[in-house]
Image: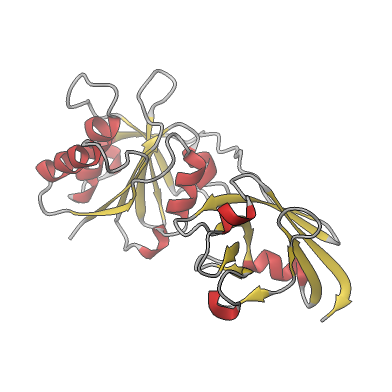
């Protein structure tokens, strides 16, 4: 069964998600619709990027991903279709692909050229992206619904960790439902920089630090803070059975600093 996923900032209070799903099922009743998230902060493509980037590789080939965040159609905001990792990604040309493809590049990229279902311009995920997604879910080729782009500027605005001999400076990129604070440094980079040396992870003042990486949350007592690599290998600041974002006063784009000692463990 074909799969279409949804990553949106539409929320679940209103009828938007239901209307989008109805449009998809009207066009292809045999498709399996997977909700990745409808709780992306409104217009926050950085958050949408993290949510999708950390799970898309779990999906089978030919999965179609619809990303609808800040996607209203206008003269400067066309809609794009990317093919990567044997999967399809559909979204507005609003900077999402610049963030999503900051390290790797899509195998092919297209400008979506399908006609809208109606003259409603404020709901492109239903009026444009659902048409393209259903075409792909039925085995259609992107060349039928899009014009290939060969000169797209993938210059990224994403912020990378800054590493020198004695420190790593990274930022908070995401706060999950538990209040766990996710940074933009991943396990391999951290281990390469730190190696077998002692370190301290500072998450506020010089008195707020963590000096080891836990394997599970229960490595520390309830209400104690910890550092851990999450299921996607991102360094995370957490509190066992607590909300680290609230209790430690951390928010997206805050700086997390790792000081690396010259002394080995």
Residue at left 11%, top 54%? Answer: 30
Q: Quadrant where the C terminus lies?
A: bottom right
125 vs 107: above or below: above
Displayed quadrant of residue 79:
top left
Q: Can residue 235 be seen in this view?
A: no
- Tell me the colour scheme of the image: secondary structure
Residue at left 34%, top 46%? Answer: 38
Instruction: Measuring from the top left, give residue 68's x and y in whole percent.
Output: 35, 38
Displayed quadrant of residue 233:
bottom right
Instruction: Measuring from the top left, give residue 128's x and y in whole percent.
Output: 26, 32
Q: Is residue 210 left or right of residue 52?
A: right
Q: Quadrant where the N terminus lies?
A: bottom left
Q: In this view, does 223 lie to the left or right of 126?
A: right
Instruction: Measuring from the top left, give residue 174's x and y in whole percent.
Output: 54, 51
Task: Tell me how many marks there are.
Answer: 0
Residue at left 21%, top 18%? Answer: 119
Q: Is residue 55 left or right of residue 145?
A: right
Q: Is residue 202 visible?
A: yes
233 vs 71: above or below: below
Query: Viewer-proximal residue, 123 or 114?
Result: 123
Residue at left 21%, top 39%? Answer: 20
Query: Viewer-proximal residue, 114 or 72?
Result: 72
Instruction: Measuring from the top left, give residue 250's x and y in whole percent.
Output: 62, 50
């Amino acid at each position: 069964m074909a799969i279409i996923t949804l990553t949106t900032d539409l929320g679940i209070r209103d009828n938007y998600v239901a209307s989008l799903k109805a449009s998809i099922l009207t066009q292809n009743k045999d498709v399996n619709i997977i909700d990745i998230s409808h709780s992306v902060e409104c217009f926050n493509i950085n958050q949408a990027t993290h949510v999708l980037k950390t799970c898309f590789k779990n999906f089978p080939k030919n999965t179609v991903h619809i990303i609808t965040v800040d996607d209203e159609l206008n003269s400067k905001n066309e809609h794009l279709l990317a093919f990567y990792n044997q999967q399809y990604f559909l979204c507005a040309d609003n900077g999402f692909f610049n963030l999503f493809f900051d390290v790797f590049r899509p195998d092919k990229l297209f400008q979506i050229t399908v006609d809208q279902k109606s003259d409603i311009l404020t709901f492109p995920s239903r009026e444009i992206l659902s048409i393209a997604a259903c075409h792909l879910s039925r085995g259609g080729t992107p060349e039928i619904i899009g014009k290939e782009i060969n000169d797209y500027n993938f210059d990224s605005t994403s912020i990378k960790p800054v590493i020198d001999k004695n420190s790593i400076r990274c930022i908070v990129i995401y706060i999950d439902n538990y209040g766990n604070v996710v940074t933009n440094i991943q396990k391999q980079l951290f281990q390469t920089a730190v190696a077998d040396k002692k370190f301290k992870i500072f998450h506020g003042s010089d008195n707020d630090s963590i000096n080891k990486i836990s394997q599970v949350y229960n490595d520390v007592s309830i209400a104690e803070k910890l550092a851990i690599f999450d299921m996607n290998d991102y360094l995370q600041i957490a509190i066992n059975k607590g909300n680290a974002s609230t209790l430690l006063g951390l928010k997206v784009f805050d700086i997390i600093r790792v000081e690396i000692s010259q002394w080995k463990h």
